[in-house]
């Protein structure tokens, strides 16, 4: 167990790192951020910041010697950096977990191997594969890069066979994945915490609505049939166990119109769809991450309010005074100086008494 007073290293400097560092500070931990960007919302609330590239071995080594455990808030951190750090200090999650979750194909193959529902998919490595996908999966389908996608980036909706080959060629030959288009009734997610000694606890499933590939809002409770909610939780816990995740695993899923639950995507870190826990739960996902990676008892996931979390994307953040004035709204701003379209600037959580 790493007691309060220990130092947590966080790879990545965005809002997820910022909210993790705030939660860690409340429990008496120090955080040291490692991130290459000039602007670093996490570093503004942390004890230390190393600004260096993820392939800077001497900076990584110095960082590793200054911390007691390493976690990450950005899932595309190069796996090699995490593997290198693990020679000095525990990294939670591990480089092995990233090997799966950084590759959409490996991720989906794992889910399928476990006999868990997953969107139909095919690897696409040539224009001919892309055309074959149109035949095998039907149209429309989605073409996604295998690596480095997030918030709907690196994915295209393909309507015709000709478009399929052309879209793949436009990717410049990077490995891709074709995915059947799911006509879902809703999107949900479950966040599970798992400790190094295998203790586990998950938050209830929540309902997510996306706009343009970016999460717009999360609604809690998800209002799912009891069986569907139980299946979603069980899927997330099985995946956390199969991957031996240390820390958090967020599992995004589709609920189909005929009631099946299909896994869409995994992320071994705090997740945007868990921000509501900051204001509505006994323990937030960020505190839970700190507890999990430090081997502390996991905190209660009890919910005190029903909630709707709304992301403030780009210029939507300009409405901040309105949210300050609303008694049921809890405003979180990430301190990002430049407002850009599609950029997550903050979020607001609307609280309601349970059951209303
Ligand atoms: P992703 O980056 O894979 O999480 O995709 C971002 C969003 O695009 C998802 O949350 C869905 O709203 C939509 N999407 C992704 N894959 C599919 C699919 N196979 N069928 C329908 N919608 C999808």
Image (cartoon, rainbow, N blue to C red):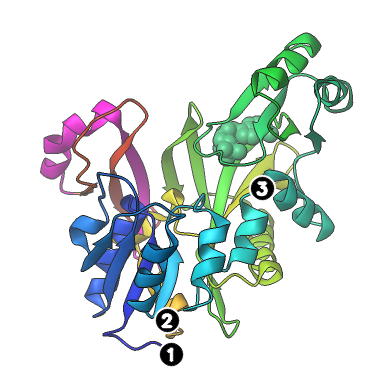
Give coordinates of residue 317: x percent, y percent: 22, 34
Work out how far the residue at label 1 is from the one at label 2, CA to CA, in angstroms. 6 Å
Question: Helix, strand, or loop for circle 3?
Answer: loop
Res. 1 mark:
1
Question: Helix, strand, or loop for circle 2?
Answer: loop
> 60 or 125: which is nearer to us?
60
Is 244 placed above or below 12 here?
below
Residue 113 occupies which quadrant of the picture? bottom right
Residue 135 occupies which quadrant of the picture? top right
Q: Is residue 105 in the magenta section?
A: no
Which residues fall within the magenta stretch?
Answer: 303-327
Label 3 vs label 1, nearer the camera:
3
N-terminal of the two: label 3 or label 1? 1
Q: Residues within 10 Å of mark 3 (few under 14, many from 20)?
A: many
N-terminal of the two: label 2 or label 3? 3
Q: Are marks 1 and 2 in contact (CB under 8 Å)?
A: yes
Q: Are marks 3 and 1 in contact (CB under 8 Å)?
A: no
> 3 or 318: which is nearer to us?
3
């Amino acid at each position: 167990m790493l007691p309060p007073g220990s130092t947590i290293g966080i790879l990545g400097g965005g809002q997820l790192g910022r909210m993790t560092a705030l939660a860690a500070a409340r429990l008496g931990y120090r955080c040291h951020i490692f991130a290459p960007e000039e602007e670093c919302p996490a570093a503004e609330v942390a004890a230390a910041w190393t600004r260096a590239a993820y392939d800077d071995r001497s900076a990584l080594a110095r960082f590793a010697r200054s911390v007691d455990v390493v976690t990450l808030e950005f899932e595309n951190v190069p796996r090699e950096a995490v593997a290198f750090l693990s020679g000095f200090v525990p990294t939670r999650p591990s480089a092995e977990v990233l090997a799966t979750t950084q590759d959409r194909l490996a991720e989906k193959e794992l889910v399928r191997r476990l006999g868990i529902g997953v969107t139909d998919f095919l690897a696409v490595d040539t224009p001919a594969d892309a055309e074959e996908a149109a035949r095998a999966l039907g149209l429309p389908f989605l073409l996604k890069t295998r690596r480095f996608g997030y918030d709907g980036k690196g994915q295209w909706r393909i309507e015709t066979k000709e478009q399929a080959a052309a879209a793949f060629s436009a990717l410049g030959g990077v490995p891709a994945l074709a995915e059947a288009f799911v006509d879902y009734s809703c999107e949900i997610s479950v966040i599970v915490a798992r400790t190094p000694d295998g203790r586990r606890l998950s938050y209830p499933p929540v309902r997510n609505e996306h706009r343009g590939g970016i999460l717009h809002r999360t609604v809690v409770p998800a209002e799912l049939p009891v069986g569907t909610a139980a299946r979603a939780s069980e899927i997330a816990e099985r995946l956390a166990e199969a991957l031996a995740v240390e820390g958090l695993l967020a599992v995004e899923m589709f609920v189909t119109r005929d009631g099946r639950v299909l896994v869409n995507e995994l992320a071994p870190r705090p997740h945007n769809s868990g921000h509501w826990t900051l204001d509505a739960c006994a323990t937030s996902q960020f505190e839970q991450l700190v507890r999990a990676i430090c081997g502390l008892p996991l905190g209660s996931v009890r919910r005190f309010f029903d909630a709707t979390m709304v992301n403030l994307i780009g210029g939507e953040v300009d409405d901040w005074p309105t949210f300050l004035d609303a008694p049921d709204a809890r405003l979180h701003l990430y301190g990002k100086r430049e407002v850009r379209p599609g950029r997550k600037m903050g979020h607001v959580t609307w609280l309601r008494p349970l059951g209303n």
